[in-house]
Image (tube, helix red, strand yellow):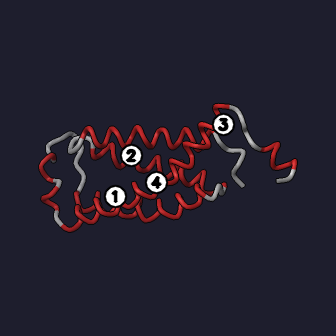
């Protein structure tokens, strides 16, 4: 390892925690993307599956919501691989995908509030980890 690359490393407790969370976020983004794809496919296949909680202030077509989750999931997998490879584009795209996932799960709050809240909180942790640990990305 060259001296220059060692200077770029953040060995503080905060940096180590953020690096660990970024790795954890990359792995979980792969899993969350797969769950998004499955959840989206089930919404596209059977509209009535999620129609039970359709009485709320804002309305969204369940089929459109399913396609949003499918696209988010398909985009999330290569982004997660970029995060795990410590690529700069993976870091930025990971924050964008996590933000889109927050918005998609916000619309899902009336249907499954606990699950959607958990995913929103996790995505906030992903955004934090990716924004704090920026030195090791190229």
Instruction: Give whichever of discs 2 and 4 has the lower sequence position.
Output: 4
Local secondary structure at mark 2: helix
Residue marked by disc 4 = 29
* Residue sticking out furthest to the top: 13
Left or right relative to 69: residue 14: right
Q: Which residue is drawn at 57% across and 46% down?
A: 22
Left or right relative to 51: residue 42: right
Which-is-in-front pick, marks 3 and 1?
3
* Residue sticking out furthest to the front: 1
Above or below residue 27? Residue 6 is: above
Residue marked by disc 1 = 35
Residue marked by disc 3 = 15
Q: Do the residues labelled 4 and 1 touch (CB within 8 Å)?
A: no
Using a 10 Å C-alpha cutoff, classify the residue at mark 4 as few (fewer than 14 neighbours), some (14 to 19) or many (20 or more). Answer: many
Local secondary structure at mark 3: helix
Where residue 125 appears, as percent x and y from the top left, is 49, 39
Q: Which mark is residue 27?
A: none
- How far apart, in angstroms, are the residues tagged by discs 4 and 3? 20 Å
């Amino acid at each position: 390892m060259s001296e220059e690359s060692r200077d770029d490393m953040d060995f503080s407790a905060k940096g180590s925690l953020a690096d660990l969370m970024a790795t954890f976020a990359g792995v979980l983004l792969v899993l969350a993307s797969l769950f998004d794809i499955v959840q989206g496919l089930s919404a596209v296949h059977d509209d009535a599956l999620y129609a039970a909680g359709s009485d709320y202030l804002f309305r969204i077509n369940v089929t459109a919501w399913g396609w949003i989750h499918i696209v988010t999931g398909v985009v999330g997998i290569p982004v997660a691989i970029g995060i795990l490879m410590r690529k700069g584009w993976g870091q930025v795209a990971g924050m964008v995908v996590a933000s889109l996932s927050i918005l998609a799960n916000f619309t899902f709050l009336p249907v499954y509030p606990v699950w959607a809240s958990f995913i929103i909180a996790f995505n906030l942790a992903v955004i934090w980890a990716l924004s704090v640990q920026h030195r090791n990305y190229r």
